[in-house]
Image (tube, rainbow, N blue to C red):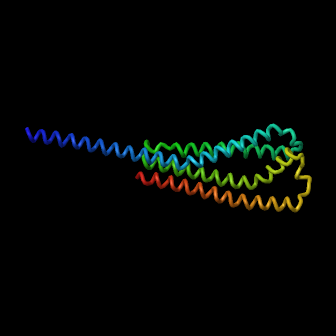
């Protein structure tokens, strides 16, 4: 009788230990998932704010599109609208996808593979956005100049101070873009390390 009680107690203790282990693993996974999602929260807030600014500017351009009275200003206007609408939507969609990877389900290998694919897409979008941002100055400036001051920059010669302001803007953009892209690299690297720790 004592042997049966001992075996029963041992089995019960073993079951409780297994249950405790599963519970601990679940808590660790939940905490890791929360940490992982928090990595992208700040970036998502900044990108959402930036998207609203872009959409507001795009709305302003649409309302004043009639002021773009030449075919080349209209082309610049269309390019400006595409830049202000399409790129923010693509970035926010990719951020949502990467932030909501369900690390609790699926295999480690599949989750990491999907993460790496989505991370590379996000970083590529940032690179494209930076490149278009620099090129975009050449089609955004004419649109804003025509809408705001009714001046066609293609038909007027620029003054020295305008060249200086343009050069300063380009330099400031280089530093800002480098800082922002490094922030993306840091966050995605940190999130990847979190996922790799689950192995």
The residue lying toward the viewer, choosing from 8 and 102, is 8
Residue 50, percent from left and from top: 68, 46
Looking at the image, which residue is at 18% across and 43% down?
10
Residue 156, percent from left and from top: 92, 54
Looking at the image, which residue is at 89% across and 46% down?
150
Looking at the image, which residue is at 70% across and 55% down?
131
Left or right: residue 105 compared with residue 115: left
Looking at the image, is 164 positioned above or below residue 96?
Answer: below
Residue 44, percent from left and from top: 60, 46
The residue lying toward the viewer, choosing from 179 and 97, is 179
Left or right: residue 129 compared with residue 118: right
The quarter of the rendered structure image containing the N terminus is top left
Left or right: residue 175 compared with residue 122: right
Looking at the image, is 176 positioned above or below residue 104?
Answer: below
Outermost residue toward the left in this view: 1
Looking at the image, is 124 positioned above or below residue 64?
Answer: below
The residue lying toward the viewer, choosing from 113 and 185, is 185
Residue 20, percent from left and from top: 30, 43
Left or right: residue 23 compared with residue 45: left
Looking at the image, which residue is at 79% across and 40% down?
60
């Amino acid at each position: 009788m004592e042997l049966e009680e001992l075996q029963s107690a041992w089995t019960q203790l073993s079951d409780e230990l297994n249950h405790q282990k599963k519970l601990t693993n679940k808590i660790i996974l939940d905490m890791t998932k929360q940490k992982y999602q928090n990595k992208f929260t700040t970036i998502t807030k900044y990108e959402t704010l930036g998207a609203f600014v872009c959409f507001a500017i795009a709305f302003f351009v649409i309302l004043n599109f009639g002021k773009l009275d030449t075919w080349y200003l209209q082309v610049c206007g269309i390019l400006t609208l595409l830049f202000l609408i399409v790129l923010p939507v693509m970035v926010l969609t990719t951020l949502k996808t990467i932030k909501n990877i369900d690390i609790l389900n699926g295999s480690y290998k599949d989750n990491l593979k999907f993460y790496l694919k989505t991370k590379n897409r996000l970083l590529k979008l940032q690179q494209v956005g930076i490149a278009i941002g620099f090129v975009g100055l050449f089609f955004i400036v004419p649109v804003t100049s025509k809408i705001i001051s009714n001046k066609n920059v293609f038909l007027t010669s620029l003054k020295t101070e305008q060249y200086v302001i343009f050069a300063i803007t380009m330099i400031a953009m280089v530093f800002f873009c480098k800082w922002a892209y490094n922030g993306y690299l840091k966050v995605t690297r940190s999130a990847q390390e979190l996922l790799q720790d689950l192995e």
